[in-house]
Amino acid sequence: MSVDITSGAVSFLSKHGETVLAEPKDGGKAFNVPSVFETKTWDVQQTFLSPSDEALYGLGQHQEGIFDIRGVPIRLHQANTNISIPLLLSSKGYGILWNNASLTDFNPADQSIIINPSTGKGRFTTGAKGSYGFVLTSDNRNQLTLQVGGQQVIDINNIWTPTSASGTAALEPNKEYEVSARGGPGGVQLAMRAPQDTTTFRSEVGQAIDYYFFYGPDLNRVISEYRAFTGEALLFPKWAYGYWQCRERYHSQQEILDTAAEFRKRKIPVDALVQDWQYWGKYGWNAMRFDEDHYSQPKQMLDKLHADDLHMMISVWSRFGEDSDVYKRMAAGSFLVPGTPWTDFFNPDAQKAFWAELKNGLFQDGIDAWWMDASEPEFDVLKGKQTFLGSGESVRNAYPLYVTKAIYEGQRATTDRKRVVILTRSAFAGQQRNAAASWSGDITANWITLRRQISAGLSFSMSGLPYWTTDVGGFFRPEDQYTSDAYHELLIRWFEYGTFCPIFRVHGYKSNAELWNYGPQVEQVLTQYDQLRYRLLPYIYSAAWGVTRNGETLMRALPLEFSSDPGARAVSDQFLFGPALMINPVTTEGATQRRLYLPAGHDWIDFWTGKRVSGGQTITADAPLDRIPMYAKAGSVIPVGPVAESAPAKTGPIDVLIYAGADGDFTLYEDEGDNYDYEHGAYSVIPMHWRDKAETLTVGDRRGSFPGMLEHRTFRVVRVTETHGAGLIARSGFDASIEFNGKAISVHVPLPTKR
């Protein structure tokens, strides 16, 4: 690092002395900057140089479908469907954590464009030729749409929208353009950013410019360093990597038990049923207890679910109905944000009080997981309020971090026998240490929304947080969802994609979203992918251990994994699931093929056919409705288990799939499946190494142990080729079998033609 002692400009250098990131010569720092938005001034601003060949990623989850955010003005502000995490990754191999929890503009749009409230139209004149950025702001309702010179730049249509949305347009120099903007009933504001080779963070409240620099240059290393700094991502219980059945909503204890029984009757794999809101009934909003009129014996209900290897997650909010007893107790303790029914989670005593209510009302009955809804908090209620840590403006983006902290630390203090599982609608830097996953909010069921969830999830993962999902099938669904062939196609494609999200969960508003309600053909395809998820659990759970132990990522964007491949830089609709499987969702209605890029430096094997394809090229892959294109990286070793109806801690024989063509390694991780004994060494790892030239698989010495560990394991080895072992076919023959007792053993696995 070097510092200009005159201007204070900082430059970050590689070990070879090359500049990786630099502030401008004048330092790029500013204070009390005039703003066109809601405050008169912004307190802190830092600008960096950004060369034209740079790509930038991260900053959370946003709904515009933009992946490379270089030059894009983005408002970092929590909202339903919008998650703001101030971690930025660069194709140059560095990361920046902007350490400020107030409302922040990334690449501020400082030129206001006046919009006629009657017509929604306005005009502006460009300067230089180039990419112009736009930020459109409204009141979280219905739509955020913008056309510039007839070109669609922003296009979000949903019952709930983020507060703002972003877009870019390549424009000609010195030309007047007409804009057409639409928002919610409260009107719109529009601002523009001219082309420039800089990156800027500007925050509303701040006592100092505060940021952290990480350098890889491998971007996976940047994520690992970020986790080492902000906290490791904790390992969920094994069941949480299975299928979660969620809907709006289950209405009674009997309905839940009947649904559980139907899953088991149909032998459809499932590990969690999710109880959405309103279960509190007569006790008032978010009363943290079941209404006995509809849930007569909650503990017995949960005991029955547990006996059937099922778990329950329940919806909990951070605000209370003023008629509830919980509200009265929290208000009496001054544990609410003044003037609101929302918990002041910035207050440590409020965190403890909230958990105590949750423990006494729900956890003691056996609830397994927490769905912390509206944790932004919704509708920006902290603005203009005073919290335990100061003004709401100074901490408004960090609220979900403290919500999840209260739950995680509360449950950990209560017991270490049950791992914490939290699903929450918002997130902030460091939240991975609180055993929290996020989902993309209340989104609409249509093709463009499905397509945008892929880039949204990849951006979220590139912001350092590894666990994320969507409402598979969309939250707002069509009224004819059960009979519509058009919707069934969308549901199948979304479910195929969801199978390979870190968390696998279906949800829908006013929906009976169980698989069998969409007809036998849809049920068959969805069940096939559900079963595939469960067969892959040894692979998934081991990859999750890599997330916890090594700071790895489960849903890996191509620029994250193949940072040296220019062809991978802009790919926003493909990803690696774990270290080996390339997932290529289909997001076009009626498609039976899709174009996809195979990164250079590797051969790739079609999961369904076993056909080998060279990397470094774009291909057209077959994609009939029941098939999502999948490719295994040559040299991959993938353990798969038997078809199961739940995620058992113990498994039978494990099939080891070998995708030859390069040397490869995999480490099989196992533990008890729940509790935190793994933190104290109660787990085992079994290394596997494929030597390609020798055509030999070596299963190394097992390291470690845990109660109930299978001392003897059978590994059935399959070398996948075009004529053998591909896809989901039932395997009657194996290329080799290994009886493993904990000591290293090797087996020769030649091609069938050599035998």
Image (cartoon, helix red, strand yellow):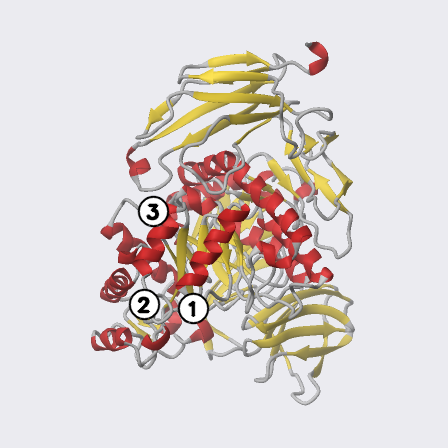
Q: Identify which residue, 504 or 664, lies in the foreground.
A: 504
- Of the pair 269 and 558, the residue shown nearer to us: 269
Name the residue located 21 percent from the left edge and 77 percent from the top edge: 332
Helix, strand or loop for disc 2:
loop
As helix, strand or loop, the secondary structure at mark 1 comes to: loop
Image quadrant where residue 595 sits: top right
Q: Position of residue 144 (x, y in %)?
A: 63, 74
Q: Secondary structure at mark 3?
A: loop
| Residue at the spot of label 2 | 288
Badge 3 is on which residue?
419
Give the Cα separation between the discs numbered 2 and 3.
20 Å
Closer to the chain start, of discs 2 and 1, is 1
Please identify the quadrant where the N terminus is shown: top left
Q: Which mark is residue 22?
A: none
**Which residue lies under the disc numbered 1?**
277
Left or right: 184 as drawn, with respect to 211 = right
Relative to 473, 668 lies left or right: left
| Residue 262 to residue 315: above or below | above
- Say above or below: 533 vs 639: below
Q: Position of residue 369 (x, y in %)?
A: 38, 54
Looking at marks 1 and 3 on the same chain, the residue that comes earlier in the sequence is marked by 1
User: Residue 661, position in %: x, y?
Assistant: 66, 22
Q: Are marks 1 and 3 in contact (CB under 8 Å)?
A: no
